[in-house]
Amino acid sequence: MAYDERLRARLRALCGELHDDDGVDPRKFFRSNRKRDQAGRKSKQLCRQVQKTLDQIFSGEMRDELLAALRIVSVSSSDDASALVVTVVADLPPDRFDRARIEVRLASMAGRLRSEVAGAITRKRTPLLVFDLLGPQGELPASGEAGAGEGVVR
């Protein structure tokens, strides 16, 4: 009989009932999920920094009238924060709202926006920015309307 089996037999004799935590190291059983929580906290912190930076750029530094009318609704990250989904809404009247033109201009400015984000955050790699454009009243695009510009605007 192996040492481990003898130890288990002795432990079974000492307890009236067996539970899931019997024989488990308490340091492992009561360990918190702190590292996982910390990764989520850092991801949220990155999203807030990117949202603040992009909001400043769209509100004051854009010379393009069409892009200056965009407002950041939210920024969310993927699992590894290599790509950020930026949801924007156009503060334009419905008659002036042209989804295709806005998506093309966002795609052309994506490099500049990403470099501005790189200057504002402290990371080894700057995340890819993926834009979701909402309509003037916050409505989602129709299923056939999404996407101009190589994965940058969807």
Image (cartoon, rainbow, N blue to C red):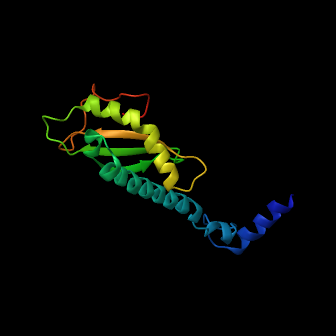
Q: Residue at x 12, y 34 (%)?
A: 95
* 142, above or below 29, in the image: above
> Front-most of 42 and 72?
72
Task: Locate residue 104 relative to residue 90 in the image: left or right.
Answer: right
Q: Residue at x 20, y 46 (%)?
A: 91
Q: Quadrant of the C terminus?
A: top left
Residue 119 showing in the rendered view: yes
* x then y, percent, for residue 118: 52, 49
Q: Residue at x 28, y 28 (%)?
A: 100
Task: Locate residue 49 relative to residue 36 in the image: left or right.
Answer: left
* 135, above or below 37, in the image: above
> Front-most of 25 and 10?
25
* 144, above or below 107, in the image: above
What is the quadrant of residue 64 in the picture?
Answer: top left
Q: Residue at x 32, y 33 (%)?
A: 103
* 94, above or below 144, in the image: below
Task: Locate residue 70 relative to residue 49 in the image: left or right.
Answer: left
* x then y, percent, for residue 57: 37, 50
> Front-most of 15 and 28?
28
* x then y, percent, for residue 60: 31, 52
Residue 18 showing in the rendered view: no
Farthest front residue in view: 63
Task: Locate residue 2 relative to residue 112 in the image: left or right.
Answer: right
Q: How many marks?
A: 0
* x then y, percent, for residue 48: 42, 58
Q: Quadrant of the N terminus?
A: bottom right
